[in-house]
Image: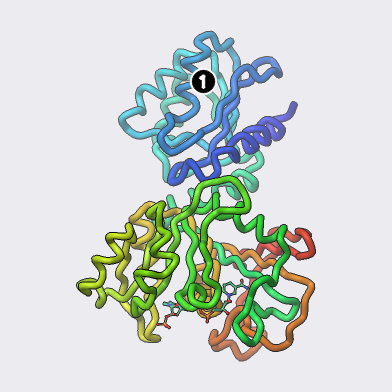
Amino acid sequence: MQDESYIQITLQMAEKGKGAVSPLSLRGVIIVNDGKIIAAEFLKDRHSEQPEFNLLSKCNNIPNGSILYSNINPIITSRDEERYVALFRNSGVKKMVFGTLDNNSLFYNKIAKKLKESGITIISGIMGKESIDLNRFFLKYGSSQTPYVTLKMALTLDGKISDINGNSKWISSVESRSMVHELRTEYDAVLVGYNTVITDKPSLTVRLVEGRNPKRIVLDTRLELKPNSDLVRKNKDNNLIIVTDKKNKDLPKLTKYYEAGVEFVFVPVNSDGMLDLKSLMRKLGRMKITSILVEGGGRVFSSFIKNKLDDEILLFIAPKLLCEGIPLCSGLGINSLSKAYKFYMNEVRKIGEDALIRLMRR
Ligand SMILES: NC(=O)c1ccc[n+]([C@@H]2O[C@H](COP(=O)([O-])OP(=O)(O)OC[C@H]3O[C@@H](n4cnc5c(N)ncnc54)[C@H](OP(=O)(O)O)[C@@H]3O)[C@@H](O)[C@H]2O)c1
């Protein structure tokens, strides 16, 4: 088998950690000797040790000349640095092949040099694009300390997210909606505007598939969401975060929300009278939220796009035409095609009756 095939296997293994390893990276690791996989392990959750420690302690007789493959380098803290290097100095692993290397890591900056001095060859960039894509949340967060942001929209053919009465249930097919629940299990948080809470009454939990709930973030400038609203009352998993104007910090009514396990993030309001999203991203980053799925509505999408805070857009386009209705965004102040925001299509596929398009900024 070629190096690509082994890295492909580590990518598939790494995927099993989705939704459980954040803020760490998704990792699969295999050790190959003479064309045979002799050990395999993936990172199961954020509390587990890096797979290498488990692998090498389980197989103390790794034959000389073995090769370690992984989609990305491990996260080793300075406390474990010597232990990690010693593990490999004393093993039969003579080469390491990585899909990508995280250049913010201790491994990249220090440990790789020590391993090379011990006679271990290290190469990277095998299936690099796929490896970077799988760990895009981790890599963005590591380089910016702010979350990776995906805007998820269900649209008609003419770009409407709701009908003229504000009704958006259901634009997309049941298959698309199941996929959205799957996505919720993978992101650290989902985020909506207060108007969407009022019009759609979303639960923002995972129900159509197995998996854990993400944090649920609501943008609510004037703190209009009532303590007896469904979202607050049903906050049994304590995942609800309300983002509001920092002027609301000392309101006596906050006690009622705190009693329901609600967390608050206070941010300044910008010159448009809306919550400052850049400040919010920094604060959520400090809370170790590495990825956010923004689920609407139109004004929230517009603000993220206008502030260039979107890393990715997922469009679920249903084969339906409304002509009248709420557009996916507005108020961007673009008056000519030459000034249009430009994207490239990373992926296009059919899901149920809908087209799914994955876009990234150019
Ligand atoms: N098809 C879809 O994918 C989809 C998904 C979700 C919702 N929807 C539809 O979208 C409609 C609701 O959209 P909407 O545009 O009326 O409201 P929205 O985007 O859901 O919410 C806007 C709310 O967020 C608050 N907010 C605070 N800071 C903000 C900021 N920086 N940027 C934007 N909003 C901020 C606003 O507060 P202030 O009022 O104080 O400024 C306002 O209350 C509904 O009809 C719903 O059915 C469709």
Q: Quadrant of the C terminus?
A: bottom right
Name which residue type carries label 1: Leu
Quarter of image, res 289: bottom left
Total labels drawn = 1
Q: Is residue 316 above or below residue 43?
A: below
Specify the farthest residue to the bottom: 335
Quarter of image, res 280: bottom left
Q: Residue 283's x, y, as percent?
A: 34, 62
Q: Is residue 333 above or below residue 225?
A: below
Q: Is residue 43 above or below residue 247?
A: above
170 relative to 293 in the view: left or right: right
Residue 306 visible, this angle? no
- Taking the spot 58% from the left edge, 63% from the top edge, the residue there is 312
Q: Is residue 24 above or below residue 286?
A: above
Q: Quadrant of the N terminus?
A: top right
Q: Which residue is mark 1?
A: 55
295 relative to 337 in the view: left or right: left
- Circle 1 — which element? helix
- Taking the spot 54% from the left edge, 13% from the top edge, the residue there is 92
- Taking the spot 64% from the left edge, 46% from the top edge, the residue there is 130
Q: 54 or 115: which is nearer to us?
A: 54
Q: 258 or 28: which is nearer to us?
A: 258
Q: Residue 85's x, y, as percent?
A: 41, 23
Residue 172 visible, this angle? yes
- Is the C-beta of the residue carrying label 1 under 8 Å from the nearest atom of ligand 1? no
Q: Residue 314's x, y, as percent?
A: 64, 64
Identify the image's colour scheme: rainbow, by chain, secondary structure or one colour. Answer: rainbow
10 Å crowding of disc 1: few (<14), some (14-19), many (20+): some
Q: 151 or 32: which is nearer to us?
A: 151
246 relative to 212 in the view: left or right: left
